[in-house]
Amino acid sequence: MKKLAFFALSVFLILSLISCGSKKPAEDTTEPTPPAVEETIEETTQTIEETVSSTGNELAIANMDAARQAAIDSGATDYTEFDALEDLYAKIKAKADNGEDVTAECNELAKKYQALATLVKAYELKDQIDEHDVPPLVQGAYDQGSDDLLDCEALFEDPDSKADDILAKATSAYASFKTVFAALSKELAKDARDDALAAKKNADSVKAAVSQKKEYNRGVEIFKKGDASYSMMGFEAAYNYYSEACDIFEQLYVDIFDKRAAALAAIEAAKKSVEESAAVAEEADLEAPLTGDVDGIEDEDAVLLEEDDYADPEDAEEYLSEDISIGGDAK
């Protein structure tokens, strides 16, 4: 009995030891503290804002640059207003380089460049109109355009003026002069056509169709485009074509006339030289006349060059009618 109790106690002790030896230490199940949600949102928002700001600057600057280039192409660099806008342009670019948000300033300046380009076009139209009598029917539009030009200049001089106000005045001035020009365009086109025909006659007088045929033909083709536009009542387009053709013919005349004058001067100089040489030769003949044939001197009746059958330069000239009609081809 004692042996059985001892055996049972031994087994219990062994099982107790085995159980204690195989037990793993308790693991730390505490989860790490996540970053504050507010901090993550703030960082993400800041990154997005920086990206949006950078992209917005790039687009605004590109738009401003395009408006600036359009103003330059219009001839705005000849106006004092352009210099003032360039100062603003340099300041805005400097701010953008420093990472500042300049979208609003870029958009404002872009409108001012656009206003200046429109103002230039309005002045150009006014200059063309001022060469003619304004029809009474559009005198009011002319006066309105003139007033708008003065108002627009005053707004450009005021540093506090809004771009929208400047652009509105420039646009109004241009629209008014467009109305006047439309009423005058038929008369303007006819005058421009007469000028182009006169310029062509001058070009023909110096045989431009022969000496500079390619450019001469270009002028003729542009003139014919003017006739086509005029006959279809496209008077403004006709005016532009005739003006361009006139410029081409005038330039041809000047170029060829100058070259001809230089050539004539050279011929006169050569004649003088020949006359002087002939006088020397005559004196030499008197003092020591030549007798018999001399090597290197051709016979007096010898034909050295074949006779050239020159074509008539007038055959190269293009005929352009003095008259023009509406609703059909030029007559």
Image: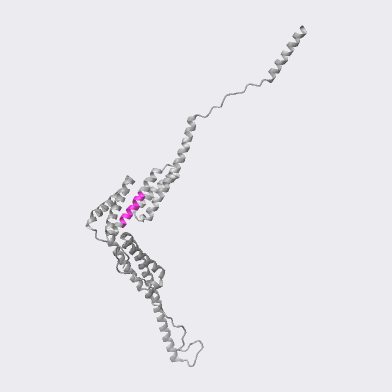
Q: Residue furthest top?
A: 1
> Which residue sits at x=35%, y=48%?
112
Residue 74, percent from left and from top: 36, 55
Residue 70, percent from left and from top: 38, 53
Residue 97, percent from left and from top: 45, 45
In front of the other: 162 or 31: 31
Q: Residue furthest left?
A: 136
Q: Quadrant of residue 244?
A: bottom left
Render colour scheme? one colour
Q: Give the vertical position of 39 relative to 241 (above or below).
A: above
Q: Give the vertical position of 117 relative to 229 (above or below).
A: above
Most common secondary structure along the magenta stretch: helix
Q: Quadrant of the N terminus?
A: top right
Q: Which residues are magenta?
A: 112-124
Q: Give the vertical position of 317 relative to 129 (above or below).
A: below
Q: Is residue 3 left or right of residue 126?
A: right
Q: Quadrant of the C terminus?
A: bottom left
In front of the other: 37 or 23: 23
Q: Give the vertical position of 60 relative to 215 (above or below).
A: above
